[in-house]
Image: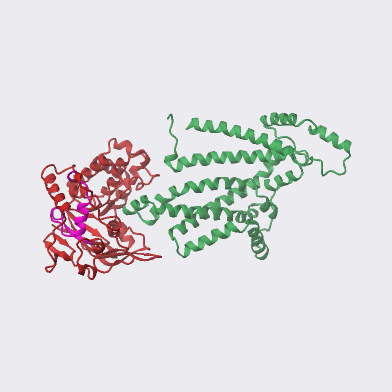
Amino acid sequence: MTRYIIQRLVYMFITLFLIATFSFFLMKFLPGTPLTAEDKLSEAQKAIVMEKYGLNEPVPVQYAKYMTGLAQGDLGVSFQFDNREVTQIIMERIGPSAMLGAQSMAVGTILGMLLGLVSAIYHNGFLDYGSTFVAVVGKSIPSFVFAGLLQYFVAVRLGWLPVALWEGWEYSILPTIALAIFPIAIAARFMRTEMLEVLGSDYITTARAKGVNKFGVVFKHGLRNALIPLITVLGPLAISLMTGTFVIEQIFAVPGLGEQFVTSVTTNDFPVIMGTTLLIAFLFITIVLVVDLLYGVIDPRIRLTEGE
Amino acid sequence: MEKLLEVNNLHVSFDTYGGEVKAVRGVDFDVHKGETLAIVGESGSGKSVTTKALMQLLPKPPARIKEGEVLFEGRDLAKLSEKQMQKIRGKDLSMIFQDPMTSLNPTMKVGNQIMEGLIKHQKMSKGEAKRRVLELLELVGIPDAESRMKQYPHQFSGGMRQRVVVAIALACNPKLLIADEPTTALDVTIQAQILELMKNIQKKTDSAIIFITHDLGVVANVADRVAVMYAGKIVEIGTVDDIFYNPQHPYTWGLLGSMPSLDSADEDLYAIQGSPPDMIAPPKGDAFAARNDYALKIDLEQEPPMFKVSDSHYAATWLLHEHAPEIEPPESVKRRMKGMARSASGNSEGDQL
């Protein structure tokens, strides 16, 4: 097991290195420079700035310098945001994004699983149709539509919660709900399908033949067997929610990473693009590892044995 | 002997989009304490549905018990609620399933799967239940029980898994054990071991067994009485000797005739012609008539009642009516019967495999 994890960590390192390399060169292919938008600067001034940030050097040299910095944990300095360090910018911005992501993931997974379970237990009944309807609506209507509706009804008309901004926990409730709709739909759909399949399997009949009641059949025998496909889709979904969702952050004026990322791309802010890309990549491959390890926890057949 | 189970006029139907499938159409039989009743018949004859209906394990809908009663120690199981059935299932009635590769929960330790019933029905503590599990694993012949009970099903072979399934079924000393083709998915040597195991356990625990199979060799080996099912009905029922040495129903003749044996090496294997009837619209008269070489005119008109052959032996065929012509079973079946008699007088165990 330990050997497996070490092996995976080495692979993760290689993956990150490759991602850093590819995104660096891809980024250099982007049209324009960080100074494209600066009309007021003269050519000579631009040359000075380019010189200062090393942007006039050949691309391989820039790459070598960037990677050396990266190896020392230095993500460089932003071109746009008052010369602040990229690490500092990301640290500041990841907070709200991660909080929104984690909250909506937790709410979404729990509610979605419950909906899916209800669907499976009352298969083809009224509750099943109701929960399937919720899942279809959640999956097909984009989250910004819900965001707008929530803002209008809950915040403006009823005045229960703030419309936007980020000044306390209550400001996170509406964006959390808007973001949670999608994971609710996904979790409900997967849970329903998997649980129905599991409930039709032979070992469930065995459990019923033992006299196990419905609750025991679903939770003790069914749930664990139905979880594998669910965590496969929920892992990556969690990352995309936690690393910032541009649209929702814009609508609710949340100072998050998603908004930051998009601004940095439109302004050719190379260090920030690189930093954010690497952070998302790092989180992604970490979650993939965690999901792989969870498989083993959930299903003993996937568990690794030492020294075989 | 005391009656443990009495099934009267049991009808089970499945409501499908194509129509009502009448899977079981009026089945009567009883099981006495400590005896083994084998139910034989081809696929789709209603054997499994009958027993799953006894346990109330059929999914409802689409399944539905249309009429009839299932008296277990005088209580009609067909009228019990799901909650009441949960108290009986696994305690008084338990079941062994066909395929050990799929009938155990892959994510639960084997010991816990056996313990579940004990904790539920006998209110045992974890420690007591664990001791009983060790006993059971020893009883079903799983060595090294202490470490095996902490393992998962995928760490067991097929035969060993079936032993675990047997242990689960036996956990609470059931009065009636239903074995639904327990050896079909196993290879021949393991089949013999599991049959031996079940026979030994029955001697020790004195529980009654309903044994579903389509392997007549297995029937001769384990059963006291045999019920032959065809198209959702019992067409002949009697002791093993009645059925094997004095079969009356042409379908039973066909089943016996189509069983390969060492004596029949020189002839073609007999097969019952045609295929089973459509159970959405079962034919008028005797359901077997269309495939029956000995069908009488009345078979196409009216269903035969159960005729009494002896106190233990009944068959539903018009051939037993007083006005029916005398008809002898076909030669191949007679030869088979002689062969049976010979092997039965010699070594009665294990040779059927």
Residue A280 percent coordinates (x, y): 63, 41
Report the side of A113 relative to B253 (left or right): right
**Count of labels in the image:** 0
Q: Nearer the viewer, residue A241 or B22?
A: B22
Q: Is residue B317 visible?
A: yes
Residue B12 percent coordinates (x, y): 30, 64
- Report the quarter where the C terminus of chain A lies: top left
Q: Is residue B91 visible?
A: no
Compared with A168, A71 (above or below) is: above
Compared with B178, A29 (above or below) is: above
Image point (26%, 67%), residue name: B68
Report the side of A266 relative to B84 (left or right): right
Quarter of the image where one finds residue A158 = bottom right
Q: Nearer the viewer, residue B304 or B299?
A: B299
Bounds of the magenta span? Answer: B234-263
Furthest residue toward bottom = B301
Compared with A146, B130 (above or below) is: above
Which chain can be seen in red? B
Q: Nearer the viewer, residue B83 or A183?
A: A183
Image point (65%, 58%), residue name: A147
Question: Does the magenta portion include B183?
Answer: no
Quarter of the image where one finds residue A41 = top right
Residue B200 percent coordinates (x, y): 19, 44
Which chain can be seen in green? A
